[in-house]
Image (cartoon, rainbow, N blue to C red):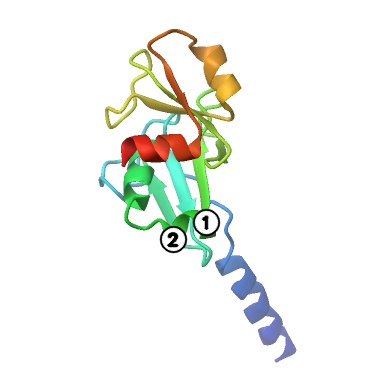
């Protein structure tokens, strides 16, 4: 009986984890647009404070999903793929964002995420490129 109590405690902590689950590219669906997530360079993910997982095929899908759910931004773990490390997630709130026609994204916003704005500038640094932090890209898309 004492093991049952221990299992319940462990299950409670594991089920409420804000850690992201791996994205299953080619089979997971975008929560916002319902397209299959296939591109490892542009995916995004949100894990709520209660551990609910939301996966997105593009950063712009996550941002548009959050437009009328802004209370989730502070309470959730928001992650984007670092373009320089396909399939590896980085904190969306501290990331840098690049909007440029030279890199297309799945939903057509030409929005790409990097671990920092400095990293984005090392990828493309030209006059047509636009660089944003989290607040800036959120405002641009909403």
Task: Check disc 1 and report the residue beneath it.
Answer: 74
Q: Residue 58: tell me if it is visible.
A: no
Instruction: Give the percent coordinates (x, y) of residue 5.
Output: 68, 86
Residue 79 versus residue 127 in the image, above or below? below
Residue found farthest to the bottom = 1
What residue is drawn where x is 56% and y is 67%?
16
What residue is drawn where x is 38% and y is 45%?
62
Residue 30 versus residue 9 in the image, above or below? above
What residue is drawn where x is 47% and y is 40%?
135
Instruction: Give the percent coordinates (x, y) of residue 13.
Output: 63, 70
Distance between the alpha carbons at the discs numbered 2 and 1 = 6 Å
User: Is residue 73 shown left or right of residue 60?
Assistant: right
Q: Residue 75: tell me if it is visible.
A: yes
Instruction: Give the percent coordinates (x, y) of residue 68.
Output: 32, 56
Of residues 22 and 106, the one nearer the viewer is 106
What residue is drawn where x is 33% and y is 42%?
61
Which corner quadrant holds the C terminus? top left
Residue 139 versus residue 86 in the image, above or below? below
Q: Which mark is residue 71?
A: 2
Which corner quadrant holds the N terminus? bottom right
Determine crowd level at label 1: few under 14, some 14-19, many 20+ residues with C-alpha closer than 10 A: few
Mark 2–mark 1 CB contact (< 8 Å): yes
User: Is residue 50 shown left or right of residue 33?
Assistant: right
């Amino acid at each position: 009986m004492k093991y049952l109590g221990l299992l319940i405690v462990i299950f409670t902590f594991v089920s409420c984890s804000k850690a992201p689950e791996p994205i299953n590219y080619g089979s997971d669906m975008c929560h916002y647009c319902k397209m299959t997530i296939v591109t490892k360079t542009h995916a995004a993910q949100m894990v709520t404070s209660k551990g609910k997982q939301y996966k997105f095929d593009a950063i712009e899908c996550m941002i548009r999903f959050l437009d009328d759910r802004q209370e989730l931004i502070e309470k959730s773990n928001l992650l984007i793929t670092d373009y320089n490390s396909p399939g590896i997630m980085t904190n969306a709130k501290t990331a840098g964002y690049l909007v440029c026609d030279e890199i297309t994204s799945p939903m057509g916003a030409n929005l790409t995420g990097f671990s920092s704005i400095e990293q984005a500038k090392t990828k493309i640094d030209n006059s047509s490129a636009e660089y944003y932090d989290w607040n800036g890209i959120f405002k641009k898309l909403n």
